[in-house]
Amino acid sequence: MIILDKPYISDFLFETLEQNQIPVILNLGVDKIVKQRKLNVVSEEFAIQQFSNTDIPLFYTNSENSISWIENNLQHTSLPEKIQLFKNKVFFRNLLKDLFPGYFYKSVLFDNLESLDITAFPLPFIIKPAIGFFSLGVYKVEDIAEWQETIHAIKKETDLIKNLYPPEVLHTGEFIIEDCIVGDEFAIDCYFNAEAQPVVLNIMKHIFSSDKDVNDRVYITSKEIIENFLAPITTFLTEIGKRAGLRNFPAHVEVRIDADGTVAPIEVNPLRFGGWCSTPDLAFHAFGINLYEYLFQQKSPDWDIILFGKDELIYSNIVLNNSTGIEGKDIGSFDYEKLLADFEKPIELRKTDFRKFPLFGFLFCETKKQNIKELERILMSDLTEYITAS
């Protein structure tokens, strides 16, 4: 069963639901949109009743905005407990701390940031909301001299983002300060099946413009990435699933992998794949696989077949976050045609309301390995070349 919610439902997800007639809960907020499609709609009361006799329902949401619905209506299941375990980064660190005994982390209230003494903290460190989303409010602090500047930036951004998402999704009242994890960063879409085994559906490398960069700009996937990291990531996910008791559980997981192959956790996002329906669409564009069908039909990818003929290709999800330094309300337009012309093979452009969200949209591309500079260029860009002032 699936519950849909704002801010975005992709056509690919709608088409999947129509073709497979997966039950969709008719919840307030998106009921008008849902009724316009040929979906297998069920009432909230019916859904709650269906789950009354199971502790581990097979359940998916496209948006963390629906977390409050789950917590209010499915208390008799294990889902609210699992959501809290993963959404709160302090709880998640506690779950795994014996695996990483030297790892430093500390929670701190937003109101206490100004008075916090960081002189004994290991540097550099990352500070971010304990309950967060989409790299909002995330900062890297290299030295003590940067601390006051970082606090100022956090307060400024908090004023801008505090009303974008429900508090269950993004809550800036509490932050976590933690060690910088060494290695390349990866995002994984997966699910834990009815037998508690992890099934990896895609692996994406999150590339950055510099060591200081913490933004979600470019995610890439390829045959090479899948083949190199499938085994260690599956082993790591097995440990998480065992500790958390995960079954029938989809997740979007972020990790770092160092030069020795050690996998270290960043976070687990419960009951969904990538936000804004982004990474499921990337997997379909890249490999022709439908993550929603794999989840609800409890299938595992046959990677030998899926990756055949993909040797020289990179597939990317480009997150067009507003890095211009100009608030959306002060931007007149964004030149999407100019953007598309800068890539050899754009697959799909998804525009968003940049005056409401700090985001111009998403772009999915296919790139030959020899042309990777087009991805490096957009990674370094602040996107000002595409905007006009209002």
Image (tube, grey):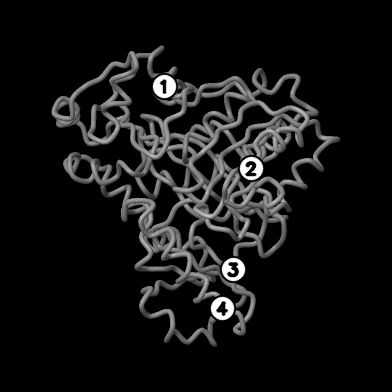
Q: Compared to 275, does 348 lie above or below?
A: above
Image position of 148 (left or right of 2): right
Specify the amino acid type for callout 4.
Glu
Q: Kindly tell me whether residue 153 is visible in this rendering.
A: yes
Q: Earlier in the sequence, mark 3 or mark 2?
A: 3
Q: Compared to 6, does 100 lie above or below?
A: below
Q: How far is disc 3 from disc 2 in space, using C-alphas?
A: 20 Å
Specify the amino acid type for callout 1.
Phe
In the rendered image, the quadrant that contains the N terminus is top left
Reading the image, the residue beneath label 3 is 140
Q: Residues within 10 Å of mark 4 (few under 14, many from 20)?
A: few
Q: Earlier in the sequence, mark 4 or mark 2?
A: 4
Reading the image, the residue beneath label 1 is 14
The residue positioned 42% from the left and 35% from the top of the image is 8
Reading the image, the residue beneath label 2 is 219
Q: Residues within 10 Å of mark 1 (few under 14, many from 20)?
A: some
> Where residue 251 sits in the image (x, y, percent)?
44, 40
- Between tags 4 and 2, which lies in front? 4
Assign a secondary structure to mark 1.
Answer: helix
> Where residue 68 sits in the image (x, y, percent)?
25, 46
Assign a secondary structure to mark 2.
Answer: strand
The residue positioned 68% from the left and 52% from the top of the image is 384
Reading the image, the residue beneath label 4 is 149
